[in-house]
Image (cartoon, rainbow, N blue to C red):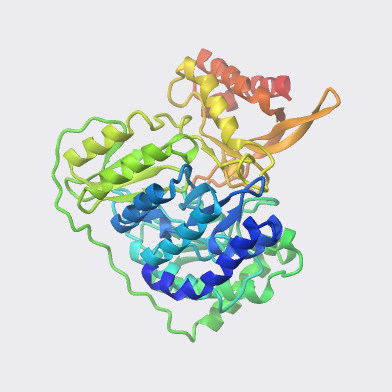
């Protein structure tokens, strides 16, 4: 798919090249550059001396040819910083002019797409990283996700949007891609149909999605995509960027009126030929079973094949770790690297021997407990709009907690965002943090707003509530004290926060 679209969008690149040269020559201010570069998945970083690039991989799947290109680019351009995002993309950071110009050119020559990875465009589709190989999935959505991505890309440069549009698919009983909290989400059911949600979203004034229709046939997904796209394009707010994401339809119209409006556009789409014929994607590899006892190795639904789970701290492996991993994957027939929506990567389609090899490579670099798999955006040391150093906070928390070796479940997985834009998805966390500020002894200090009680679980979705503002410097000790309190009762955070609600509030009050 990407090769087709990179060829299609090559004609747009001179605009990007010209703006980028002007940015580095200080002829364009960061905000002016963002207005042009964002549509190419590129943004200036804090300080205005470097940029980053976001590479778009549908639903987070990287094929062998993608990995070869990335390995060559890392070596050729001396890339030093890579990050896995919560929207299942790959980002390279701290790029100088020659690096970003050369990397962009080569990506489009090799079929790696960046168009629409930022700005007011349909963004990268999110979907379960293990679709097609997960033993617990209801049905394979691989080909549907590809068809949906193709259709969304066809709008770029043809039909405009007031803001970005995020589409998501799910085919399991979990809700890891946050499908019910997107601008448009297709939630798979055991009977092979979809429930369709729309007008959801995180960030300022977050909203859970509105259930548009239940029991939708797979073949009709593009009709719903067309309806949502045209509805947003034609009725969205182009004047007030602070209130023009689709979730604001719930405020301006209400859920019932929005649902009616959606069906009006769905009826208009019915005259189009958008039926999708999809089938399960076969894994063309013979398995070879073996005895594997390793916490990072799991069985696929294909007999004799396995996948390895890899979660680098904060979704940011060192460049050497990343290069070693993708080099090993390149040498394995049929293997893929897949990125999940919680900054976890998976290496799929492995025999038992191959799984042991990959597990050996990542063993000393991967998180093991749910707490260690906490999520963070890159934060304000890199992001030009970030308020606080979310990645730094996560490092400090993990370092402070490490000596205590708390058991699984004692501490929850944390979700940390550097600002209200919620790239760390803090609102859906049982415990989350959002960058902010606090007055201490008459001075403003870096701080984070604490959220608790959120849930991404399918059918139990809930937005967390603010519990107070903690100074950034105090949060690691707050988490240590929390772990000690829970460990003393031989409980887990999930149970303890309910059974010891007063004690939990007292602990929060101590640090607020």
Q: Position of residue 108 (x, y in %)?
A: 42, 66
Question: Of residues 281 and 416, which is closer to you in this image?
Answer: 416
For residue 138, above or below residue 292: below
For residue 395, above or below residue 339: above
Q: Where is residue 233 in the image (x, y as percent from the top left)?
A: 63, 74
Q: Where is residue 229 in the image (x, y as percent from the top left)?
A: 57, 72
Question: Of residues 116 and 17, which is closer to you in this image?
Answer: 17
Q: How many marks?
A: 0
Give the side of residue 12 with respect to residue 220, left or right.
Answer: right
Residue 427 falls in image quadrant: top right
Asked whether the viewer can see residue 334, the reply is yes
Residue at the extreme bottom: 271
Residue 350 falls in image quadrant: top left
Residue 26 falls in image quadrant: bottom right
For residue 320, above or below residue 489: below
Asked whether the viewer can see residue 432, the reply is no
Residue drawn where x is 73% and y is 22% of the image: 509
Question: Of residues 352 and 409, which is closer to you in this image?
Answer: 352
Residue drawn where x is 16% and y is 33% of the image: 291
Question: Of residues 124 and 3, which is closer to you in this image?
Answer: 3
Residue drawn where x is 32% and y is 41% of the image: 325
Q: In which quarter of the image is the C terminus?
A: top right
Q: Position of residue 475 (x, y in %)?
A: 64, 25
């Amino acid at each position: 798919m990407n090769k087709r679209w990179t060829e299609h969008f090559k004609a747009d690149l001179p605009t990007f090249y010209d703006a980028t040269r002007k940015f580095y020559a200080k002829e364009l201010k960061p905000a002016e550059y963002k207005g042009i570069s964002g549509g190419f998945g590129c943004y200036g970083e804090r300080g205005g001396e470097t940029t980053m690039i976001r590479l778009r991989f549908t639903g987070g799947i990287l094929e062998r040819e993608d990995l070869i290109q990335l390995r060559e680019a890392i070596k050729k351009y001396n890339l030093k910083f890579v990050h896995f995002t919560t929207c299942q993309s790959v980002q390279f950071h701290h790029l100088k002019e020659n690096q970003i110009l050369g990397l962009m050119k080569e990506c489009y020559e090799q079929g790696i797409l960046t168009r629409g990875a930022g700005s007011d465009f349909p963004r990268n589709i999110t979907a379960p990283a293990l679709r097609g190989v997960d033993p617990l999935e209801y049905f394979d959505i691989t080909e549907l996700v590809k068809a949906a991505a193709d259709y969304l890309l066809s709008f770029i440069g043809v039909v405009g949007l007031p803001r970005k549009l995020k589409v998501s698919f799910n085919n399991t009983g979990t809700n890891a891609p946050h499908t019910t909290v997107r601008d448009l989400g297709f939630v798979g059911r055991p009977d092979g149909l979809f429930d369709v949600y729309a007008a959801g979203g995180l960030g300022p004034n977050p909203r859970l999605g509105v259930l548009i229709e239940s029991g939708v046939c797979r073949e009709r997904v593009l009709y719903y995509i067309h309806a949502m796209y045209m509805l947003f394009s034609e009725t969205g707010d182009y004047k007030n960027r602070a209130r023009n994401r689709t979730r604001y339809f719930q405020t301006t119209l209400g859920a019932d009126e929005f649902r009616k409006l959606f069906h009006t556009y769905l009826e208009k789409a019915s005259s189009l030929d958008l039926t999708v014929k999809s089938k399960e994607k076969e894994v063309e590899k013979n398995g070879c079973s073996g005895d594997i006892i390793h916490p990072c190795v799991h069985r696929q639904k294909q007999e004799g094949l396995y996948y390895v789970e890899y979660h680098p701290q904060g979704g940011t492996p060192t460049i050497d770790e990343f290069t070693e991993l993708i080099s090993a994957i390149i040498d394995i027939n049929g293997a893929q690297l897949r990125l999940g929506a919680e900054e976890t990567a998976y290496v799929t389609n492995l025999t038992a021997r191959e799984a042991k090899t990959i597990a050996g490579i990542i063993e000393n670099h991967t998180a093991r407990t749910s707490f260690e798999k906490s999520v963070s955006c890159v934060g304000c040391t890199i992001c030009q709009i970030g308020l606080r150093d979310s990645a730094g906070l996560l490092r400090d928390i993990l370092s402070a907690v490490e000596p205590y070796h708390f058991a699984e479940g004692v501490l929850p997985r944390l979700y940390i965002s550097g600002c209200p834009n919620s790239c760390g998805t803090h609102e859906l966390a049982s415990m989350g943090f959002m960058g902010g500020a606090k007055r201490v002894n008459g001075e403003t200090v870096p701080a984070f707003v604490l959220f608790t009680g959120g849930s991404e679980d399918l059918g139990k979705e809930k937005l967390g509530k603010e519990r107070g503002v903690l100074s950034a410097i105090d949060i690691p000790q707050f988490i240590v004290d929390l772990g000690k309190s829970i460990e003393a009762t031989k409980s887990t955070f999930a149970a303890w926060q309910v059974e010891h609600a007063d004690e939990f509030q007292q602990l929060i009050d101590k640090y607020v």
